[in-house]
Image (cartoon, helix red, strand yellow):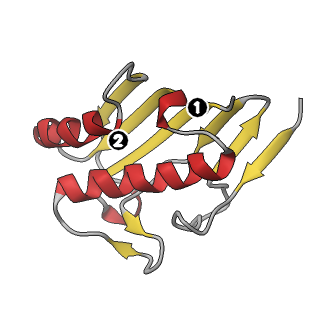
Amino acid sequence: MSKKIIRTENAPAAIGPYSQAVQVGNLLFTSGQIPFVPSTGQLVSKDIREQTKQCLENIRAILVQAGTGFENCIKCTIFIKDMNQFGQINEVYGSYFPENPPARSCVEVARLPKDVDIEIEAIALIK
């Protein structure tokens, strides 16, 4: 089985030696997406709801580039700096998965790249 690198300018460019996503067979693995606006390379805002939305929009861009969508996500992992923000994050996250949400883990961490408050990664099927 071969691997295919997925890249789009509609999501932030990688800030290190990694790919935005890798496809292996019919599985897509995204790298963690932070809440940077692709066109500016800057943090969307300090608001955790807007940061969550931007992470998910970045993931959407990668999914679309690979020919899939949120309806085909099978697992997401969310990394957050403050578990007290979980409710706000969950509210935004839930709006992207109104039916049959994927499996998910959410972990509080000490620090994230560029000192953002949230990072989200996804695994999806490509049909």
Residue denoted by label 2 = 79
Hey, what amino acid is under mark 2? Phe
Quadrant of the rendered structure where residue 107 is?
A: top left
Query: Which quadrant of the figure contains the C terminus?
Result: top right
Expressed as whole percent of the image width and height from the top left, the position of residue 116 reads 31, 60
Residue nearer the viewer, 25 or 19: 25
Q: Which mark is residue 124?
A: 1
Residue nearer the viewer, 108 or 25: 25
Q: Residue furthest right?
A: 1
Expressed as whole percent of the image width and height from the top left, the position of residue 19 reads 67, 55
Q: Is residue 36 left or right of residue 91?
A: right
Hey, what amino acid is under mark 1? Ala
Check disc 1: other Cα within 10 Å, few if <14, some if 14-19, many if 20+.
many
Residue nearer the viewer, 16 or 39: 39
* Residue positioned 37% across, 26% down in the render: 105
* Residue positioned 65% across, 36% down in the render: 28
Q: Is residue 47 left or right of residue 29?
A: left
* Residue positioned 32% across, 71% down in the render: 43
The Cα–Cα distance between marks 2 and 1, rounded to whole angstroms, is 18 Å
Expressed as whole percent of the image width and height from the top left, the position of residue 47 reads 16, 61
Mark 1: secondary structure: strand
